[in-house]
Amino acid sequence: MKNLKFSWCGVVAALSVCLTASADGPSLWYRKPADGNWTAALPVGNGRLGAMVFGNTSKEQLQLNEDTVWEGYKRDGANPAALAALPEIRRLLFADKNEEATALAGKTMMGIPTRIKSYQPLGDLWLEAPDSGAPTDYRRELDLDTGIASVHYKIGDVSFTREVFASVPDDVIVVRITSDKPGTINETLSMTRERDAACVNDPDATNRLVLRGQLTVEYAGQPPAPGMKFEAEVIALPSGGKISGSGGKLVVEGANSLVLLVAGATDYRGTDPDDLCRATLAKAAAKSYDTLLAAQVADQKRLFERVSLDLGSAGPEVEQLPTDERLGRVEGGQSDPGLLATYFQYGRYLLMGSSRPGTMPANLQGIWNDQIKAAWNSDYHLNINIQMNYWPAEVCNLAECHEPLFDLMDSLVGPGGHVAQVEYGCRGWVAHHLTDPFGFAGPADGVQGIWPMGAAWLAQHPYEHYLFSGDKEFLAKRAYPLMKGAARFILDFLVEAPPGTPMAGKLVTAPSHSPENKFYLADGKQSAFTYGATMDLEIIHDLLSNCIDASKTLNTDAAFREECESALMRLAPLQISKKDGRLQEWIEDYKDVDPRHRHTSHLFAVYPGHEITPEGTPELAEAAKKALESRGNGGTEWSKPWRMCFWARFHDGNRAYALLTDEASSFLYPNLFNRYPPFQIDGNLASTAAIAEMLLQSHMNSIDILPALPDAWPTGSVSGLRARGGFTVDMQWKDGKLAGATIRSSLDGPCKVRYAGKTVEFPAAAGKSYRLDGNLRVI
Ligand code: FUC
């Protein structure tokens, strides 16, 4: 048996302690361990591999995730009974026979299987030190700027430091334990998983542990089938002392320091997970800790430091408090702009940690999940949640983190095309309200899942990616084909509302839902199933307009463009209620079952769309505002940031801020994860997007500076936000007024800037910066 080799450099290792001992940039920190509370543990992630670090001193837990550990196998879900039933379902819906339509659709249209399965944890890594007394001087921290979670404490007169990071460049989780007295590190390592895996010692290497397993897939009504094979491997690299291994454990005794490298993999992409883990670990183990650390820190800073935010301070005393105590103050109604700025940056950190080029997209919990059957399967929900996850990607200068979403879309084109044909007789590709990594594109989770707008909404994302970057090659090769396929489905799917209905002769969707809300029909019966829900019309307006613009930019597809134009002209118009002036959620003025429902789907056209704006469509904007008012300030952890975005688009920073304080005071766990409950990452990520939207907007062919600055942030600055058209914007403000802004352009083209009723326009050149004063004079 041999130990895997690891090169060590004490000098640079000492330097690394300095790097992480106390964070200069935004960080979360605590005076106590997470104590078994998963939502107090601190997340690290490289987009693919993640760990929740509990910070316990005698029995440390790293709860591990790998982003392809999912129960399931390839299935698109198409139901062959759907197509024959579709005309009758439509007829029933147009005749107000919603109950009968629901029953028939439930029998014929639901995906096979009718539900998807859960994303699951990889396992747990445990580090047990002999209990030699209570720790003192305890501090644990997550430095967002370096991505390092650290724990510092003393036992007696020995100081211990543990550092953990998930490296993108080396694709491993790295743990290092050091102390200030030689020979004091004693740890017993093991790995466990609730089911389907066992931990063994590697017969070829004394210092390697392997947690190996395979899932069983149990779709309802199907025989159990073998599922994903997965593996987590750890190698222990002590300096000094001795190491031994048996019974699925490694024992390190009397070491001066200890480095652990953790790899994780599945056979999702067809490669044996054991081969993947070994190859990754061999490469990482050939590097010194300081080389791994330096690569990690450089990579993290490269993305993270693109944006900085200062919203003011509650004073040095508050700034020095641990994160949970600051959260406690906010929960008690006190303001803390510094904590809100950290919360903003934490959203960027979480997106960086759960979505990097080549990984799966961020699911409902990013990549961090400790449950075998997670809430909503920790899946990809396409009727709001995954889109929210990506709202901060462009504006908050993390455009490359957007890429996994486009990969997911690519993977759905084939299965979604099959479902489009089999269920609807349409060309193009469709997705419904949720999906998984196995190409599931059919309706799931009951009739509310018959919402064939998933692809159409997703298609907004690659186009936005293009609008921010101006990358025409991306538009031609990736974005436009995805958009065109989604639009192709919609063009085939739209039907003329029949005579006798209020929109007779206009194009509508049928069947349709306004996610996941219900209304009363004239006969007093409730329904969620409908035709032509407002959100469908708004998504379609967005998609077809984007296709028209993109085809012009690319100078292609004149015939398809005309088809889009003609469908847009014939699309049923948005409706304002004659009863109360609200933008209607449904094509007919139905009464809501729950007027305070958590979804605000009919306001898609305000955000993330922009068909409705106070300047461009004042009447609709007024109606949308009334609809928003009547929805109230309640809702779930993700409802509020969406509402923040609406208020930002309505230029009401104080209303947006009120919701933000509500979110921070009532919907955060100690580790600042958003609390549904349980944890859902969409609220974190959408809050980050909403804060950005309060400071900068660019959906009106202009850069709108401080469009919704709340009174609570009179003085502050932000740098590095992105605006559509290839711009990066820095701004400073004082006493509630713009002090100055710098706009950097990466493209040649016109630049129009607006602030407080003033407008300036100038031709911008690629690579040039423009400095503006508080009156928008270019200086
Ligand atoms: C949507 C929401 C729920 C929840 C789920 C994951 O269906 O309506 O509130 O967030 O996604």
Image (spheres, rainbow, N blue to C red):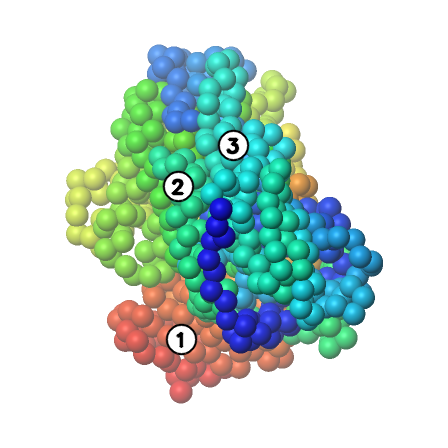
- The tag earlier along the polypeptide, 3 or 2, is 3
Residue at mark 3: 213
Q: Residue furthest front?
A: 1
Residue at mark 1: 743
Q: Is residue 675 visible?
A: yes
**Label 3 close to label 2 by CB (< 8 Å):** no
- Label 3 CB less than 8 angstroms from ligand 1: no
Task: Decide which of 63, 204 is in the foreground and name it.
Answer: 204
Q: Give the foreground label among 3 and 1.
A: 3
- The tag earlier along the polypeptide, 2 or 1, is 2
- The tag earlier along the polypeptide, 3 or 1, is 3
Residue at mark 2: 275
Q: Residues within 10 Å of mark 3 (few under 14, many from 20)?
A: many
Q: Amino acid at mark 1?
A: Ile
Q: Amino acid at mark 3?
A: Gly
Q: Position of residue 463 (x, y in %)?
A: 34, 51
